[in-house]
Image (spheres, rainbow, N blue to C red):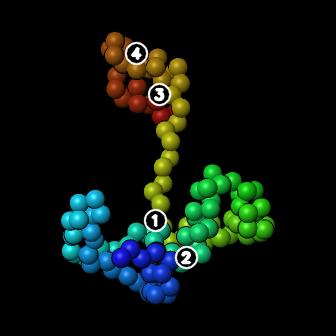
Amino acid sequence: MVKDWQELTKLTQGAPVTVERVKLVSSGIAIEGSFDLPNLARLPAEDQVFVMTFVKCHGSIKDMEKFFGISYPTVKNRLQRIGANFNFIENFPAPPKTNEDDNVLTELEKGGISVEEALRRLQR
């Protein structure tokens, strides 16, 4: 019998949970071991609903304000509180390449400048 995730959340009341058996529905194959729940599944039910609504609203804080009848700062604060449960990877985009960069690389390829000179120019 399949149980709803909300029932599990009520039973555990925020206590840490380890899953020891997983069954693939399509094949009936069961895997036993010790599996931690994903961070999102460890959130309290109301925070999971909040995150799902945020995704449904396509990340629009204005839509979240309307949906929950709360203020912009309240939405932001709640998202920050929920986000503190996750480890995020910082992703810094590379600076845009300029025509000057292409010129330096072309000069380097033709042997017109040294590698050291190319690096010096590209670091500006």
The reply to whether discs 3 and 4 touch (Cβ–Cβ < 8 Å) is no
Seen from the viewer's position, the closer of residues 80 and 58 is: 58
Decide which of tag 4 and tag 2 comes sooner along the chain. Answer: 2
- Residue that numbered label 3 is attached to: 121
- Upstream in sequence: badge 1 or badge 4: 1
Q: Earlier in the sequence, mark 1 or mark 2?
A: 2
* Chain-order first, disc 3 or disc 4: 4
Mark nearer the N terminus (2 vs 3): 2
Q: Amino acid at mark 4?
A: Thr
Mark 1, residue position: 87
As displayed, is residue 91 above or below residue 34? above
Depth-wise, is mark 1 or mark 3 nearer the camera?
A: 1
Q: Relative to residue 16, is residue 58 depicted above or below?
A: above
Instruction: Write down the residue under mark 2.
Output: 45
Report how far apart the C-alphas of labels 1 and 2 lie in the structure.
Answer: 20 Å
Q: Say what secondary structure mark 4 lies in.
A: helix
Pair 2/3: label in front: 2
Position in image of residue 49 (x %, y %): 59, 69
Residue type at numbered disc 3? Arg
Q: What residue appears at the point 75 percent right and 56 percent down from the top-left corner? A: 62
Expressed as whole percent of the image width and height from the top left, the position of residue 65 reads: 76, 63
Tell which circle, 1 or 3, labels the residue nearer the N-terminal end. 1
The residue under label 4 is 106
Q: How many marks?
A: 4
The three-letter code of the residue at mark 1 reads: Asn
**Decide: marks 2, 3 in contact (CB < 8 A)?**
no
Cα distance between the residues tagged 1 and 4: 41 Å
Q: Is residue 122 visible?
A: yes
C-alpha separation, residue under disc 2 versus residue under disc 3: 54 Å
Secondary structure beneath dot 3 equals helix
User: Please, what secondary structure does the residue beneath circle 2 have?
Assistant: helix
